[in-house]
Image (cartoon, rainbow, N blue to C red):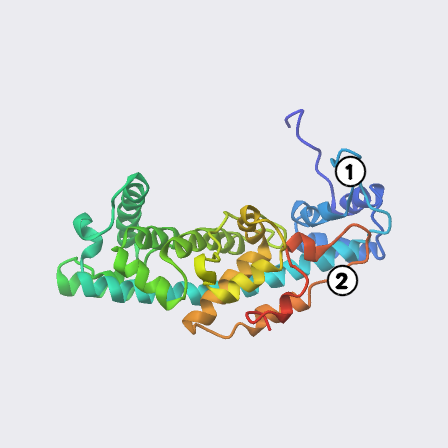
Amino acid sequence: MSSNMKPFKTYEQQVDVLQGRGMLVGSREHAVQVLERVNYYRFSGYSYAFRQKAGSGQLLDTFIPGTTFEDVETLYEYDRNLRFLVFSHFSQFEVYLRSRLGYLLGEVDPLIYEDETLCDCQGNKRKKAWNKFTRKSKDLIKASKEAFVEHHYKQYGGKLPVWVVVEVLDFGALQNLYSVSPRNVREGIAKELECTDPQLATWLNSLRVVRNICAHQGRLYNKLYPEPYVPRVLRGGRVESPKIREVIDLFGVPQDEENTEMSKTFGMLTLLKYLMDQGGIGDTESLTQILKERPNISVPGVDISRAMGIPQGWEETRLWS
């Protein structure tokens, strides 16, 4: 064993470590059972919010007095339920995006995904997205075992129309396809969702990271995500996406800090709910409900609402009410 590697610890010893750092454990048997099904390092990731801080703000190894094993477990279970719910809702939006891209691109040309001249590949960023898309889409099509792919290969000599291709793409490839789609296609989808194409492009990028965290069972509630373009107040008082703008105004921060506030978990859920509502994609009431039911932990200094970026008055906005 490497001299730098920590020695193996039994579940009981892992509980001892937590207790040694000041965590109160009501039932050792229950704690062991939790750690048997939840890896210690996954569980301990949720305990970081409960650790004491030095004067410099650096986290210490010891827990805030009064921290219990049940507090950390409650936060873990909340995040697990949140992750499951968000992934379920995002999956509905993903199906919607596949459908709209497949239909609108198919109106241009069934094989548009093979013809760079029909797409918007101007500039280094879009050219890079095109190259990524073509490489990944070929691999995904080749690896697909879907019956509808085999059917089209047999019936049409190996050529798949774009409305079939979108169903075998992973979300990264789908996002790249959106990026290189003709401008009128991108703007058409964005208009349906009552936002702009540049906004939707960044929202997809932010939500892609949320999706991947959910898919890989990562911690969701207190992360920062790629900053999205937020709706603006334009000259003459016109407001872009007013339902989102109403939420952003609750942050009470200068305009140049709004993107950062929206990059927190609540901001991501706000974007997801807005897109689903505007697209008529599904019932989002459960998103509102799980935010209302977030854990109320009484340990001093542990503020789940703040960690998620939830502003006061959020539930009174038109989007979330």
- 45 left or right, relative to 94: right
In this rendering, the answer to whether 42 lies above or below 59 is below
Q: Position of residue 105 (x, y in %)?
A: 24, 61
Comparing 120 with 51, the one in front is 120
Please tell me which residue is depicted at 25% across the width and 44% down the height of the picture.
122
Q: Dot 2, crowdedness within 10 Å: few (<14), some or many (≥20)? A: few
Question: In the rendered structure, which amino acid carries the disc numbered 2?
Answer: Asn
Q: Which mark is residue 61?
A: 1
Comparing 209 with 248, the one in front is 248
The image quadrant where one finds the C terminus is bottom right
Comparing 223 with 169, the one in front is 223
In this rendering, the answer to whether 67 lies above or below 57 is below
- 52 left or right, relative to 94: right
Q: Which mark is residue 296?
A: 2
Q: Position of residue 61 (x, y in %)?
A: 78, 38
The image quadrant where one finds the N terminus is top right
Question: Which secondary structure, mark 1?
Answer: strand
Q: Dot 1, crowdedness within 10 Å: few (<14), some or many (≥20)? A: some
Q: Position of residue 221 (x, y in %)?
A: 62, 55
Q: Is residue 258 visible?
A: yes
Residue lying furthest left: 157
Please tell me which residue is depicted at 18% across the width and 53% down the height of the picture.
118
